[in-house]
Image (cartoon, grey):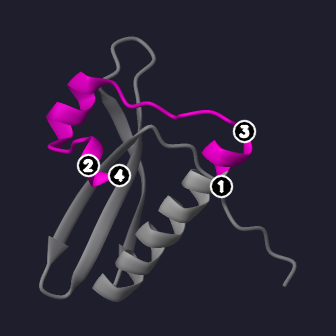
Amino acid sequence: MNEQVPEYYSDVFYLRTNPWGVAITFGAASPKDGIPDHDTCVVRLSHVTAKAVSMIIKKHIKAYEKDNRTMITIPPALMSELGIGPGDW
């Protein structure tokens, strides 16, 4: 396979679920005001794949924090807006 896979940067995402699966729309925020500027791509996953991906990402982030003796923090206002708390980690 010589074709290149496109790469994207995202600092905004929207998550939708329904009985058939999960869709994550990734986008980029405007550098001026932080408001989402445009959608970059949509990734559709089965529930099983979405759960496996989330568990693997969590495992890798925890290993990164441990290996680098750091803690990636999420601002409290953002956590509140997302409806998540420290116990969710």
Identify the residue at horizontal 34%, vertical 57% (top origin).
25
Q: Which mark is first along the chain, 3 or 4?
A: 3
Nearer the camera: disc 4 or disc 1: 4
Nearer the camera: disc 1 or disc 3: 3
Q: Element type at marker 3?
A: loop
- Give yes or no for contact between labels 2 and 4 (Cβ–Cβ under 8 Å): yes
Q: Quadrant of the N terminus?
A: bottom right
Q: Which residue is mark 4?
A: 89
Judge from the rendering whether residue 64 lies leftward or rightward of residue 12; answer left or right.
right
- Residue 80, percent from left and from top: 16, 33
- Give yes or no for contact between labels 2 and 1 (Cβ–Cβ under 8 Å): no
The part of the chain drawn in magenta is 64-89
Nearer the camera: disc 2 or disc 1: 2
- Residue 73, percent from left and from top: 44, 30
Identify whether 24 is placed above or below 18: above
Identify the residue at horizontal 57%, vertical 52% (top origin).
61
Counting other residues with Cα less than 10 Å from the Cα at mark 3, is it few (<14), some (14-19), or many (20 or more)? few
